[in-house]
Amino acid sequence: MKVDSFFASAPYITRDAIFALTAQYKQDPSPLKVNLGQGAYRDNEALPWILPSVAEARRRVHNGKLDHEYLPILGLPEFRKAAR
């Protein structure tokens, strides 16, 4: 007795390119390779590696000078001045 799969009527979805990229990464023998595909970056001890730009942004946000209020309708005055 043949039983049809519950998923037999599910539409086919094309493969996600990121999986092919990950497979290529795994096959690359270079010791200098870095996998930036899925966003979980790790250091040599397999701990999360924080991008330097993210670390700087975190430092700036946590400097205690922000009050987390909405900006005035015209935006941040210092930014407008620097943009001019």
Image: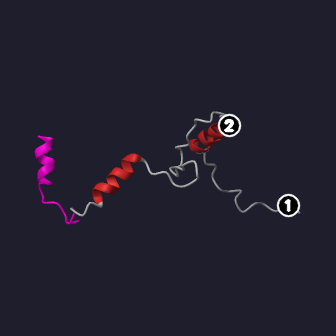
The x, y position of residue 79, in whole percent, is 16, 48
Q: Residue at x 71, y 56 (%)?
A: 8
Instruction: Give, as a three-letter code, the residue at label 1.
Output: Lys
Would residue 67 be found to the left or right of residue 4 on screen?
left
Would you place residue 2 above or below residue 50 in this image? below
* Residue name at image x 51 percent, y 54 percent: 48
Residue type, numbered disc 2: Gln
Quadrant housing the N terminus = bottom right
- Look at the picture and state if 60 lies above or below 69: above
Which image quarter: residue 58? bottom left
For the point 61% across and 44% down, the residue is 19
Question: Which residue is nearer to you in this view: 49 or 2?
Answer: 49
Could you tell me which secondary element the residue under label 2 belongs to? helix
Q: Does 63 lie within the magenta span?
A: no
Residue 46 lies left or right of residue 72; in this view the side is: right
Say whether residue 34 is left or right of residue 64.
right
Residue 60 locus on image (x, y percent): 28, 55
Left or right: 67 as drawn, with respect to 62: left
Query: What residue sits right under mark 1 in the picture?
Result: 2
Q: Which residue is mark 2?
A: 27
Region rendered in magenta: 66-84
